[in-house]
Image (tube, rainbow, N blue to C red):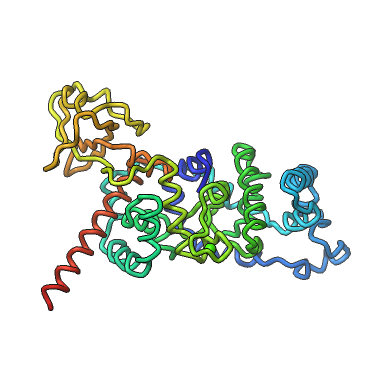
Amino acid sequence: MRDLPSLTLTLALALALTSHAQAAPEKASSNSAQSSVETTTAPASQATAQPDAAAEPDSYASRPEVRNFALAIAQRHGLEAGALLALLGEAQAQPGIIRLMDRHVTGEPSWAGYKKRFVNARRIRDGVSFMASHEAALARAVQTWGVPASIISAIIGVETGYGRNTGSYRVLDALTTLAFDYPRRGAFFREQLEDFLVHVNEDQLDARTMRGSYAGAIGIPQFMPGSIRRWGVDFDQDGHRDLITSATDAIGSVAHYLQGHGWQAGAATGWWARSRGEQWQSQVSSRFEPDHTIAELARLGVVAQAPAKPAPETRVALVAFQSPADPVGLYLATTNFQAITRYNRSSFYAMAVIELAAAIEAERRQSVTKASAGR
Ligand SMILES: [Ca+2]
């Protein structure tokens, strides 16, 4: 998704990215009527307007700031200003998106509730199928970037249910609305819109039909356009980085993104821990920066609960996941945990990915065992 700020953003909407994926399909109906606007659909009362979307008074293309934006992009990237402006003129304002951006999420979500939503029988089973269907691409991604296949698959599973719910908003509408009618984040979304316009040009995609989340996150892995340009990979080598229809491109792009954000091949994501005393309490972090060693935290009373103890010099952050089953819920999170939070800046998100990946692996092992027992 993204260069760092973009990632952070879509994800700072912590549940948003993931919840939009669930919520998007029913929202589609309200937008679909406006989605494929051609100039011919203009009501009769506007019949005197020029048949050019850019000339309609309500069109984004009639706004001076949009015209300046198109000119600047054309200049920076060697694109044709007239074509850019015509495309922006087709964008339909989506006030509903502004309401979604500004909605206040009520109530602190609990780890137990979050986990149930993303680490459940269906998502595990679908993850096993996804891994089987994309075995070769996943193997190639593991080899190229060192990110485990189950982690790549689990991210795609949490983001979009393995590509089932990739969002129903026209990306052009969402990004143009947020770029020009959402001043609070306008600068960020103008960057994303610029990256989107350049991306569709570079990868020869149809900007008019591409759909995504209400915040403009695109495709199977829900990358923001800035991240597609920076981290997206044409992993099936068909000449387009196409995260909407190519699972192979999505797999390569997720792995490349995580590796680019510090993933270390072969290293753990972390360890659940036991604690005693209270000295460790001030060290619980929500920044995920691994700025303690295992040895330091042991001195403060926190010890990994693992058959193979991590090396004392291993650097970790102390992250808490309270739940009814474990009211303390301490986790010693490594740089690989932090890399997942760069995709979505949420400890719940990262842990859901980690636990879903582990559950998919366990299910795969079990089916292998069953298969060999049956022979
Ligand atoms: Ca491709």
Q: Is 5 situated left or right of 259 in this image?
A: right
Residue for point 84% across, 65% down: 51
Q: Is 76 situated left or right of 202 in this image?
A: right
- Using the image as rendered, state which of residue 359 and residue 327 is in the foreground: 359
Q: Position of residue 280 (x, y in %)?
A: 21, 24
Q: Position of residue 316 (x, y in %)?
A: 28, 32
> Which quadrant of the view contains residue 346?
top left
- Using the image as rendered, state which of residue 194 and residue 211 is in the foreground: 194
- For the view shown, which residue lies furthest in the front direction? 143
Residue for point 45% across, 63% down: 248
Q: Is 112 situated left or right of 35 in this image?
A: left
Q: Position of residue 330 (x, y in %)?
A: 22, 36
- Using the image as rendered, state which of residue 83 and residue 189 is in the foreground: 83
Residue for point 35% across, 66% down: 135
> Which quadrant of the view contains residue 45?
bottom right
Q: Position of residue 188 (x, y in %)?
A: 60, 40
Residue for point 54% across, 53% down: 214
- Using the image as rendered, state which of residue 7 and residue 238 is in the foreground: 238
Residue 313 sits above or below residue 33 on the image: above
Give the quarter of the figure containing the C terminus: bottom left
Residue 370 sits above or below residue 2 on the image: below
Total marks shown come to: 0
